[in-house]
Image (tube, rainbow, N blue to C red):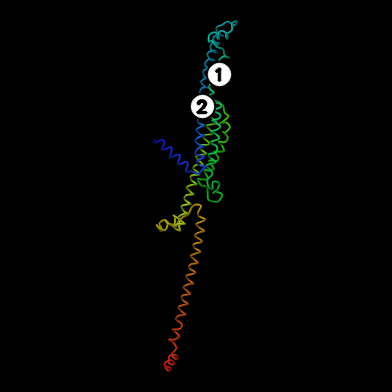
């Protein structure tokens, strides 16, 4: 029950991934398993052939020892080959035929072995291209002046190892029944390529997640996480440093905010000037009445 639960959790985690990752998760282990089965069959065939060779060599050595003794002790008129054939009950030709039949018996399921090797190679080959289909995968930070990142370095290593693995595609399928060198080299280079590309994709996803978090903080709080930390601890931390693909957008937003602040300051200055002018106009008639004594005397005479 516990094993089934773990298997279900693994399947659910795979199904949550994007389609290229799901395909790579299914193709990679399947192809690797097929190649391991073919390598196991080829190894057993090689062991069997080696046993046939050792048995044939032992029989042939026994026959040759008999002939050497015969040549020393038997008169030249008699045939040593016939004498040894009667003693050991076989000839050199019979030993060679027996060894050939033994080798043929060791080659078990040759068609199935080649078919499994072909299926395994074809299943493993698309894994690295599928893992490399992430956003900005072909973006060259070195060309943009940002320096070489671990993502880019792993990306280059992955494609280099993948290129070397293609040299062993044909040997993995077409090599003899007892040979495993092509399959082993193919699995080693493909394993290095897959591990490097998966690590490069993981680093790219982490960088994208950080950029998304920075954009969310800008939209929600009006500042980045680094700015929030700098505002909290003050001079201890110093000015915030923004890193990532959102630097350009953040700079544009800051420029727009500065422009709006300047416009608001200009509007406040003009409003203050207008209020001063209105206050001056209201106070002007009162000052005129207070400073005109002739007008007040005329008013009193009329009354």
* x and y, in percent, of residue 241 in the image: 46, 55
Which quarter of the figure has residue 162? top right
The residue lying toward the viewer, choosing from 136 and 234, is: 136
The residue lying toward the viewer, choosing from 1 and 274, is: 1
User: What secondary structure is found at the residue carrying circle 2?
Assistant: helix
As drawn, 183 above or below 148: above
Q: Determine which of the numbered discs, if any, sits on residue 200 in the image.
A: none
The residue lying toward the viewer, choosing from 134 and 138, is: 134
Q: Residue at x 53, y 15 (%)?
A: 59
Residues at marks 2 and 1, CA–CA distance in whole angstroms: 19 Å
Q: Residue at x 51, y 56 (%)?
A: 249
- Give the residue at the far bottom of this rendering: 301
Q: Determine which of the numbered discs, if any, sits on residue 41 in the image.
A: 2
As drawn, 112 above or below 154: above
**Mark 1: few, some, or many residues within 10 Å (few <14, many ≥20)?**
few
Q: Earlier in the sequence, mark 2 or mark 1?
A: 2
Residue, disc 1? 101
């Amino acid at each position: 029950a516990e094993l089934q639960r773990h298997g279900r959790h693994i399947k659910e985690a795979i199904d949550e991934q994007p389609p290229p990752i799901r395909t790579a998760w299914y193709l990679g282990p399947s192809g690797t398993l097929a190649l391991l089965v073919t390598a196991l069959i080829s190894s057993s065939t090689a062991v069997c052939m080696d046993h046939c060779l050792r048995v044939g060599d032992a029989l042939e050595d026994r026959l040759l020892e008999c002939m050497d003794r015969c040549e020393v002790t038997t008169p030249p008129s008699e045939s040593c080959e016939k004498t040894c054939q009667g003693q050991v009950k076989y000839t050199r030709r019979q030993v060679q035929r027996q060894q050939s039949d033994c080798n043929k018996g060791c080659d078990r399921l040759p068609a199935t072995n080649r078919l499994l090797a072909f299926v395994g190679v074809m299943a493993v080959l698309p894994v690295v291209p599928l893992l490399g289909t992430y956003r900005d995968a072909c973006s060259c930070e070195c060309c943009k002046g940002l320096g070489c990142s671990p993502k880019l370095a792993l990306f280059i290593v992955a494609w280099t190892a993948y290129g070397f693995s293609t040299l062993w595609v044909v040997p993995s399928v077409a090599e003899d029944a007892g040979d495993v060198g092509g399959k082993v080299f193919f699995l080693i280079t493909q394993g290095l390529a897959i591990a490097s590309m998966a690590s490069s994709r993981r680093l790219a996803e982490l960088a994208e997640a950080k950029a998304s978090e920075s954009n969310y903080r800008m939209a929600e709080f009006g500042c980045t996480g680094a700015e929030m930390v700098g505002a909290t601890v003050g001079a201890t931390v110093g000015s915030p440093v923004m890193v990532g693909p959102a630097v350009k957008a953040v700079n544009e937003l800051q420029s727009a905010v500065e422009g709006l602040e300047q416009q608001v300051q200009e509007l406040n200055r003009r409003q203050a000037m207008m209020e001063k002018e209105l206050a001056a106009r209201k106070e002007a008639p009162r000052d005129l009445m207070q400073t005109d004594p002739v007008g007040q005397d005329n008013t009193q005479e009329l009354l």
